[in-house]
Image: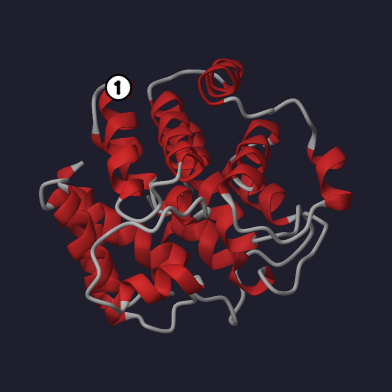
Amino acid sequence: MIGAIIGDIVGSVYEWNNIKTKEFPFFQDKCFFTDDTVMTVAVAEGLMNGGTKNDFIDAMKKYGRMYPSAGYGGRFGSWLFSEDRKPYHSWGNGSAMRTAAVGWYFDSLEETRKMAALAAGVTHDHPEGIKGAESTAAAIFLARTGHGKAEIKEYVEREFGYDLSRTLDEIRPGYRFNENCQDTVPQAIIAFLESTDFEDAIRSAISLGGDSDTLAAITGSVAEAAYGVPQELKDKAWKYLDEPLRSVLRRWEKGV
């Protein structure tokens, strides 16, 4: 889960100021955590509290209201601060950026995909929203259970229909800000597939431009499972978080 959080924090300063290079300061004083981190933590708490639909809804509304200025999308923000508990048929990339914990929680790919769909569907119940979350969680599961990049690529393409054949150099010039799953998740996974280590994966995702913090959060969640995360980067990320978020991470680390 820390991989997604690092991606979010490092990408935070580039979401509205896109760059098209991998050469940039990794952690900066002006970096911050965004809604990607807040909802990643919320999904983790929802899992630890039982993993039911209501557990996820309660955790998202709890943490969303604790951090009301974290940068939520318009429709999600309206849902978050209302009493409405029904999904709103979103295909936004929020379903994928928050699903890191699901990829680590279960012992089978079937259970992983089922829970990813459930956690996504409390808001993002459009087929593309579900697919984005399932494919991300599946890639995490496969990476952490020893499957190589070729196997991950083949599985994601076969099961979810994403085209992962393009290179970053082909994507980068024309890629622009986009908040839907179908134009975020494949690009984020490609950034992982081309990477050489965890930090390179984050840099690759951010170098595409677009929704930089979310791209890097998705890429980082898979890269963590494949490479692990250097302790130095974990320690730096920890400093950007406050105690309520840290407490969930401590609980997570004890239980997983």
Q: Estimate how packed mark 1 is, as few (under 14), some (14 to 19) or many (20 or more) residues with alpha carbons within 10 Å.
A: few
- Please indicate whether residue 42 sits to the left or right of residue 163 in the image: left
| Between 235 and 97, the one nearer to me in the picture | 97
Residue at 63%, 48% in the rendered image: 184
Q: Residue furthest left?
A: 50
The reply to whether residue 46 is visible in this rendering is yes
Q: Secondary structure at mark 1?
A: helix
What residue is shown at x 82% (from left), y 56% (from top)? 21
Q: Is residue 2 left or right of residue 31?
A: left
Q: Answer with left or right where residue 159 lies relative to residue 252.
A: right
The tally of labels here is 1
Asked if one can make out residue 33 in the rendered structure from this viewpoint, the answer is no
Kind of residue at badge 1: Glu
Residue nearest the observer in this picture, 205 or 163: 163
Q: Which residue is mark 1?
A: 110
Residue drawn at point x = 24 percent, y = 30 percent: 106
Residue 94 lies, in percent from the top left, at 47, 56
Snapshot quadrant of residue 144: top left
Q: Looking at the image, is 151 positioned above or below residue 179?
A: above
Identify the residue shown where x is 81% and y is 43%. 171
Relative vertical location of residue 227 with respect to residue 161 in this rendering, above or below: below
Residue 75: x %, y % from top left: 45, 69
Q: Position of residue 57 (x, y in %)?
A: 22, 60
Measured along the vertical axis of the image, is residue 63 above or below residue 36? below
Q: Nearer the viewer, residue 44 or 61?
A: 61
Quarter of the figure with the C terminus: top left
- 112 above or below 147? below
Q: Is residue 190 left or right of residue 130?
A: right
**x then y, percent, for residue 251:** 17, 56
